[in-house]
């Protein structure tokens, strides 16, 4: 591997989380995110971080 390539640590790796929800709920969430100029992924990540902080289990 070249010297200029930055290797990602385990903490930097991204993974997918599959969540099953009703189509209408998803559509309303996506629309609300668009109205607020944000993305669904960003808001789900924010929810997870906030939830972990409240539960005392920060990553």
Image (spheres, helix red, strand yellow):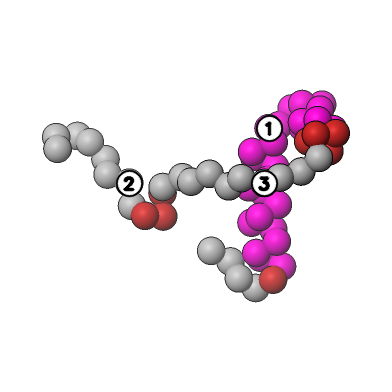
Say which residue label 3 marks: 19
Q: Which quarter of the picture shows residue 2?
A: top left
The extreme left residue here reads: 2
Say which residue label 2 marks: 8
Under tag 3, what secondary structure? loop
* Count of numbered marks: 3
- Mark 3 touches mark 1? (CB < 8 Å): no
Q: Which quarter of the picture shows residue 32?
A: top right
- Mark 3 touches mark 2? (CB < 8 Å): no
Q: Is residue 36 visible?
A: no
Percent position of residue 24, x then y: 85, 33
Main SS category, magenta section: helix
Query: Where are the magenta residues, as a range?
Result: 27-54
* Image: 11 above or below 43: below
Distance between the alpha carbons at the discs numbered 3 and 1: 16 Å
Residue at figure coordinates x 61%, y 45% from the top left: 18
Say which residue label 1 marks: 39
Residue at figure coordinates x 69%, y 36% from the top left: 40
Distance between the alpha carbons at the discs numbered 3 and 2: 26 Å
Percent position of residue 27, x then y: 81, 30
First in residue order: circle 1 vs circle 2: 2
First in residue order: circle 3 vs circle 2: 2
Label 2 Cα neighbours within 10 Å, binned few <14 / some 14-19 / many ≥20? few
Query: Going by the image, does 54 lie left or right of 9?
Result: right
């Amino acid at each position: 591997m070249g010297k200029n390539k930055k290797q990602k640590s385990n903490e930097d790796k991204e993974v997918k989380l599959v969540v099953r929800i009703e189509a209408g709920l998803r559509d309303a969430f996506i629309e609300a995110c668009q109205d607020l100029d944000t993305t669904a992924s960003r808001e789900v990540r924010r929810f997870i971080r906030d939830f972990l902080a409240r539960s005392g289990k920060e990553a």
